[in-house]
Image (cartoon, rainbow, N blue to C red):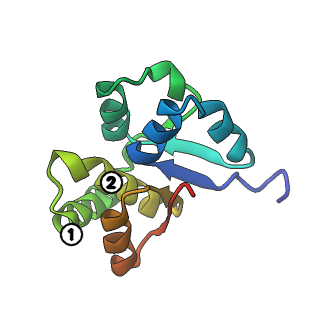
Amino acid sequence: MTDAEPEPLLVFDNTCLTAFASAHLMPVLKDLTVGYRVGTTEAVREEFCAGPNNVADIAWVDLLPEQGMNELVALAEYVQALGAGEHDLGEATVFASAQVRAAIAITDDATATKIARRIKKVEVHGSL
C-alpha cells in the first residue's frame, strides 16, 4: 500500500466489539486491526453502550455517518432480509454502511452473515 492509498475499512458489529470488551481484550483488537480503519454505526454504538460496556472502550473506533440515499436503500434491503427487529438492526446498519463504502463488515452473528453472503453485495467476516 502506498501513502496515497486509503486504509481499508472494517465496519464492526456489536457482537464482536462486546466479545472483546467483555474479555478485556479491546487493546488486542486494536492491535489486530493495525493497517485498517475501524468504524461502526450509531446503532451499534448505542447497542454496545446499552450493555455493561463503556463507550471509552471504543473511543478509537470511528463513528461512521450515514452516506445518504444509497445507504438508506441498502439498509432497507438488509432490514427486510434480516427481519430486523431491535436485535438485528445493528447488523443491518453495519452491512449497509460497509456496502456503500466498499468496506468489510465484521460480525459474529452466524445467521446475519449467512443472509448477507446470500445477498452478495457486501464482504462479511467474523472476528475469528
Determine the image quadrant of residue 27.
top right
Q: Which x, y percent locates residue 15?
A: 40, 46
Q: Quadrant of the C terminus?
A: bottom right
Q: Quadrant of the N terminus?
A: bottom right
Residue at coordinates 16% horizontally, 66% vertically from top-left?
Answer: 80
Q: Which residue is mark 1?
A: 81
Residue 118, labelled with which disc? none
Q: Is residue 52 above or below residue 128?
A: above
Residue at coordinates 70% horizontally, 51% vertically from top-left?
Answer: 7
State the CA–CA distance, disc 1 to disc 2.
Answer: 11 Å
The furthest residue to the front? 23
Q: Which x, y percent locates residue 74?
A: 30, 63
Viewer-proximal residue among 116 and 73: 116
Q: Secondary structure at mark 2?
A: helix
Q: Residues within 10 Å of mark 1 (few under 14, many from 20)?
A: some
Viewer-proximal residue among 18 and 35: 18
Q: Which residue is mark 2?
A: 91
Q: Which x, y percent locates residue 121?
A: 41, 74
Residue at coordinates 32% horizontally, 27% vertically from top-left?
Answer: 51
Viewer-proximal residue among 98 and 72: 98
Determine the image quadrant of residue 26.
top right
Left or right of 36 on screen, residue 98: left
In the image, what residue type sits under mark 1? Ala
Q: Residues within 10 Å of mark 2 (few under 14, many from 20)?
A: many
